[in-house]
Image (cartoon, helix red, strand yellow):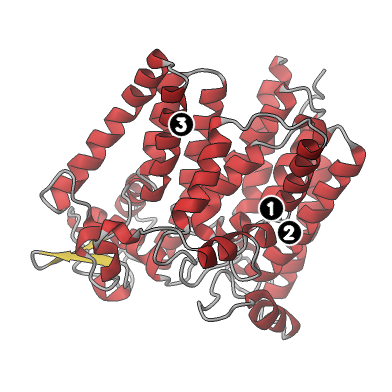
């Protein structure tokens, strides 16, 4: 790869970051507010207790008379130093609830939503370029399925799904290069974003164990040890016990106190997470339906490739989440607990598909459909889709779009543009970016 190609990839990342941070979430959602409360407590009071803000979120644990965020700690810990600097330099001013402000939610959304989303696309595109896919096709094959999916709706929001997905992608890329220690380290960091992602390193280790690859197995485990120690230290600081997470002391969602809310998978959950218009993966990331059809076709013709360890891990993730008591993710757009799974399945996209004009066209067409769906949601209600709505796109998103109920949480609106104009401008800028960004990097030869 030429030095010019290496140098210009930051330009591509910057363009993707502009698009992924166009919308920055200010909603007072229990999930995002819980993480923001931990950041504000650390910066404002120097403590992990969120007692000052506990009434602002239902996602919390209570122990010994104190309230805590019940979330995996890494996203909040990443945002904390940035918010500390903003507070000390006067860039962040206290509001009605001290330093837990809409500005903190936007910062968390940018760092834990926009940045990992843009980085995931950049990493996927780089991998395809290195595999010999021409640059425009590589960028489109990485960007369109991501923007045309439920993951785009969560970019710009202070959730943990995209950081976890990005870290697992780094782990998968390290696995492909046989960089075993790095693989374990990235996977360990991902678990500290979202505990359910532990299924991925478990499957990876199981594959190495079955293959009797003892040295790689030990190196993967060694890479994850520092993160395991950090997690145990966090547990000691909060619950007093290294192996006892805050989920064992839920204030409201008490079902999580037993096995963190997990049980045996159910058929209803498996259908709901894959095929249903309620939270189905193939509905909310249509590009995966094309990849699945292509894979089935290759198997039928006897050309199926052996699934990688990370493909098995992704499938195991679907099964695991289908055993979760709240598999639908509460108020959500798509199967939000499967963000990392979606990225790992996208990683399995066969290079041969991208060299076939018909299949490549089908992949892009499905992605554009997904983009319009995600754009409609993000421009109106975002992910605020009530649990009881079984077909939320038809019953909630389309009516809001028809009534021009545009979302104002877009940075051009802060500059004076109307929400409708900002929403339509995004589509124009997105189309222009797809034409311009490939020219920002030298063609791969």
Question: Taking 224 as reference, is 385 above or below it?
Answer: below
Which disc number belongs to residue 204?
A: 3
Sequence order check, earlier mark of 3 and 1: 1
Q: Is residue 385 left or right of residue 238?
A: right
Q: Is residue 357 left or right of residue 11?
A: right
**Rendering coords of residue 424 (x, y %):** 77, 67
Q: Secondary structure at mark 1?
A: helix
C-beta proximity under 8 Å, tags 3 and 1 = no
Label 3 or label 2, whichever lies nearer to me, is: 3
Reading the image, the residue beneath label 2 is 371
Label 3 or label 1, whichever lies nearer to me, is: 3
Which disc number belongs to residue 147?
A: 1
C-alpha separation, residue under disc 3 versus residue under disc 2: 32 Å
The residue lying at 48 percent from left, 68 percent from top is 26
Q: Secondary structure at mark 3?
A: helix
The quadrant of the rendering that contains the C terminus is top right
* Residue 431 appears in view: yes
The quadrant of the rendering that contains the N terminus is top right
Sequence order check, earlier mark of 1 and 2: 1
C-alpha separation, residue under disc 3 versus residue under disc 1: 28 Å
Looking at the rendering, which quadrant does residue 2 occupy? top right
**Rendering coords of residue 246 (x, y %):** 22, 57
Q: Is residue 351 left or right of residue 357?
A: left
Q: Which of 207 and 357 lies nearest the eye of the viewer?
A: 207
Outermost residue on the right side: it is 357
Q: Which of 75 and 231 lies nearest the eye of the viewer?
A: 231
The residue lying at 39 percent from left, 24 percent from top is 220
């Amino acid at each position: 790869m030429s030095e010019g190609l290496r140098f210009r990839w930051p330009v591509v990342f910057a363009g993707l970051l502009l698009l992924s941070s166009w919308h920055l979430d200010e909603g007072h959602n229990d999930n995002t507010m819980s993480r923001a409360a931990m950041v504000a407590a650390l910066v404002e009071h120097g403590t992990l207790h969120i007692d000052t803000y506990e009434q602002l979120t239902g996602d919390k644990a209570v122990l010994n008379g104190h309230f805590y965020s019940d979330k995996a700690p890494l996203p909040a810990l990443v945002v904390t130093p940035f918010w500390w600097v903003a507070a000390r330099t006067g860039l962040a001013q206290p509001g009605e609830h001290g330093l837990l402000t809409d500005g903190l939610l936007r910062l968390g959304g940018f760092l834990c939503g926009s940045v990992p989303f843009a980085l995931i696309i950049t990493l996927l595109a780089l991998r395809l370029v290195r595999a010999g896919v021409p640059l425009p096709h590589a960028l489109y094959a990485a960007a369109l399925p991501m923007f045309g999916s439920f993951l785009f709706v969560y970019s710009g929001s202070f959730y943990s799904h995209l950081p976890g997905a990005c870290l697992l992608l780094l782990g998968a890329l390290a696995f492909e290069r046989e960089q075993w220690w790095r693989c374990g380290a990235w996977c360990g960091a991902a678990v500290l974003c979202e505990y359910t992602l532990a299924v991925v390193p478990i499957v990876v280790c199981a594959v190495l164990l079955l293959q009797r690859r003892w040295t790689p197995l030990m190196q993967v485990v060694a890479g994850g040890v520092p993160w395991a120690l950090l997690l145990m230290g966090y547990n000691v600081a909060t619950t007093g016990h290294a192996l006892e997470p805050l989920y064992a002391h839920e204030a409201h969602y008490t079902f999580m106190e037993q096995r963190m809310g997990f049980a045996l998978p159910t058929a209803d959950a498996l259908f709901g997470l894959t095929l249903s218009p309620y939270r189905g993966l193939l509905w909310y990331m249509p590009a995966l339906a094309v990849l699945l059809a292509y894979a089935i076709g290759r198997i039928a013709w006897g050309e199926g490739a052996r699934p990688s360890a990370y493909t098995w891990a992704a499938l195991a993730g679907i099964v695991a989440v289908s055993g979760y008591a709240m598999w639908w993710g509460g108020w959500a757009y798509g199967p939000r607990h499967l963000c990392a799974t979606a990225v790992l399945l996208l990683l399995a996209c066969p290079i041969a598909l991208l060299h076939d004009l018909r299949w490549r066209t089908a992949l892009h067409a499905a992605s554009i459909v997904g983009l319009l769906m995600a754009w409609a949601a993000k421009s109106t209600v975002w992910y605020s889709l009530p649990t009881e709505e079984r077909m939320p796109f038809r019953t909630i998103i389309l009516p809001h779009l028809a009534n021009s109920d545009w979302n104002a949480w877009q940075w051009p609106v802060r500059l004076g543009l109307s929400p409708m104009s900002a929403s339509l401008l995004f589509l124009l800028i997105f189309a222009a970016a797809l034409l311009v960004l490939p020219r920002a990097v030298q063609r791969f030869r």
